């Protein structure tokens, strides 16, 4: 498993979400039906910063050995984020099949990343042969 590609893809995915949340909070509020709400706008922007910061961590770790005991905090942080997010998204789409296709897509991407980081967490990089 090429961990450099995994780290780059997860960094790009998180960065895109982070920039969207940071720079378009009013549009997101309108898109989900909240309307103008300065407190929710602030929360969305802070969440965007969190996503972007996580993306930068993944980007900076892309050239390092990842898996098993190597960069374990980065792997477990990614696994926890994608696993918890994946469970929440899958639960949401199973409870309401009429959710937009974007939510279904997010559920799939989160689940895929959760599986990949779970494998990385449990496998030593030398066991790739």
Image: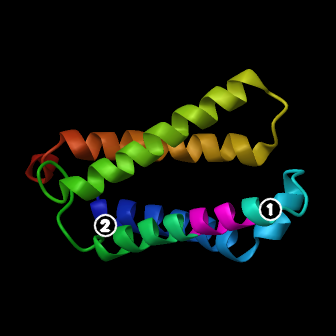
What residue sits 63% from the left and 74% below the top?
19
Q: Can residue 38 be seen in this view?
A: yes
Q: Residue 17: where, in percent of width, then height? A: 62, 64
Q: Residue 124: where, in percent of width, then height? A: 12, 47
What residue sits 76% from the left and 72% below the top?
24
Which range of residues does the magenta coloring cover? 41-48
The relative height of residue 114 versus residue 39 in the rendered view (above or below) is above
Q: Does the magenta stretch include residue 1?
A: no
Instruction: Say the numbered circle drawn on residue 28.
Output: 1
Say which quarter of the image contains residue 22.
bottom right
Give the residue at mark 2. Answer: 4
**Pointers 2 and 1 in contact (C-beta within 8 Å):** no
The relative height of residue 28 versus residue 23 in the rendered view (above or below) is above
Please state which of residues 49 and 126 is positioned toward the viewer in this rendering.
Answer: 49
Question: Is 29 on the left-hand or right-hand side of 77?
Answer: right
Please state which of residues 65 and 37 is positioned toward the viewer in this rendering.
Answer: 37
Helix, strand, or loop for circle 1? Answer: helix
Please state which of residues 79 and 65 is positioned toward the viewer in this rendering.
Answer: 79
Q: Is residue 111 visible?
A: no
Quick one: which residue is furthest to the front in this view?
A: 39
Q: Is residue 47 magenta?
A: yes
- The residue carrying pointer 1 sits among few (fewer than 14), some (14 to 19) or many (20 or more) residues within 10 Å by Cα, namely some
Q: Residue 84: where, in percent of width, then height? A: 47, 38
Question: Is 72 on the left-hand or right-hand side of 40?
Answer: left
As measured in the structure, the alpha-carbon distance from the residue carrying label 2 to the one carrying label 1 is: 32 Å
Instruction: Say the numbered circle drawn on residue 13.
Output: none
The residue mark sitting in front, 2 or 1, is: 1
Q: Report the number of numbered marks.
A: 2
Please state which of residues 13 and 53 is positioned toward the viewer in this rendering.
Answer: 53
């Amino acid at each position: 498993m090429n961990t450099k590609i995994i780290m780059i893809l997860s960094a790009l995915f998180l960065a895109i979400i982070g920039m969207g949340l940071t720079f378009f909070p009013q549009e997101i509020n309108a898109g989900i039906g909240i309307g103008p709400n300065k407190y929710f706008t602030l929360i969305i922007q802070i969440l965007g910063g969190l996503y972007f910061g996580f993306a930068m961590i993944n980007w900076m770790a892309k050239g390092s050995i990842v898996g098993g005991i190597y960069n374990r905090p980065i792997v477990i942080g990614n696994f926890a984020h994608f696993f918890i997010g994946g469970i929440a998204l899958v639960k949401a789409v199973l409870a309401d099949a009429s959710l937009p296709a974007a939510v279904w897509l997010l559920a799939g991407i989160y689940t895929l990343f959760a599986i990949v980081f779970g494998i990385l967490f449990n496998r030593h990089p030398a066991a790739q042969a």
